[in-house]
Image (tube, rainbow, N blue to C red):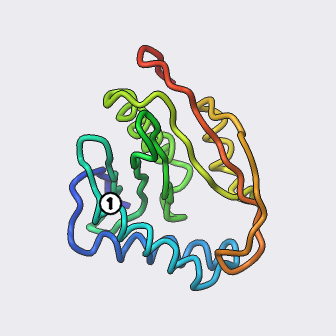
Amino acid sequence: MSAITIRTDIRPGDLGYITYLVGIIYAKEYGMTLLNDIEVATFLTHFIQHYTPEKERLWVAETDEHIVGCILVYEESPGVAHLRSLILHPSVRGRGLGRQLMQLAIDFCREVGYQKITLETFDELHAALHLYDSFGFQLTGERFHAEWGRPVREVQFELLLSNSAKS
């Protein structure tokens, strides 16, 4: 496999490709339905329509001009960032890319002055949960729902930031 590059410019096709990547991976690995695709596409559309580059960022990981991963940060409220859409294609897992994307996102949040990062995921994403734990995220809540096409236990986390600390 070719080298993986990470970029932050948002290009035509990115939103569709990311929606596709999330859709095929979550359907195959977790049994999600088109409802998940709709939720992801709706969120990404809203993100781009209201994108504020000084406070928000999308990192896209590519190899051979194919998107193989991403992560994004958006402003949830003043001083609070929300981490979303950390996804890796199975072909690039286990190479430290998830950790690299997380570090880029957390460093960005510190640089722009966020005091806290929040995120939601579901409890079956064991590698992601381990990664969040390794960066110091703390569990803050949970809820059960079927909004993505089947019942899931969604879990919420937060990381309090100290602008001088690094993971």
Residue at image location 26% in from the left, 67% down from the top:
65
Of residues 7 and 115, which is closer to you in this image? Answer: 115
Q: How many marks?
A: 1
Percent across and percent down for residue 161 are: 50, 25
Q: Is residue 150 left or right of residue 119?
A: right
Disc 1 element: strand
| Quarter holding residue 93 | bottom right
| Quarter holding residue 139 | top right
Residue at image location 66% in from the left, 75% down from the top:
147
Percent across and percent down for residue 124 are: 74, 59
Q: Quadrant of the N terminus?
A: bottom left
Q: Residues within 10 Å of mark 1 (few under 14, many from 20)?
A: some
Residue 28, relative to residue 84: is it above or below?
A: below
Residue at image location 35% in from the left, 56% down from the top:
61
Q: On the image, numbered disc 1 is attached to which residue? A: 62
Residue 116, relative to residue 43: is it above or below?
A: above
Residue at image location 74% in from the left, 46% down from the top:
141
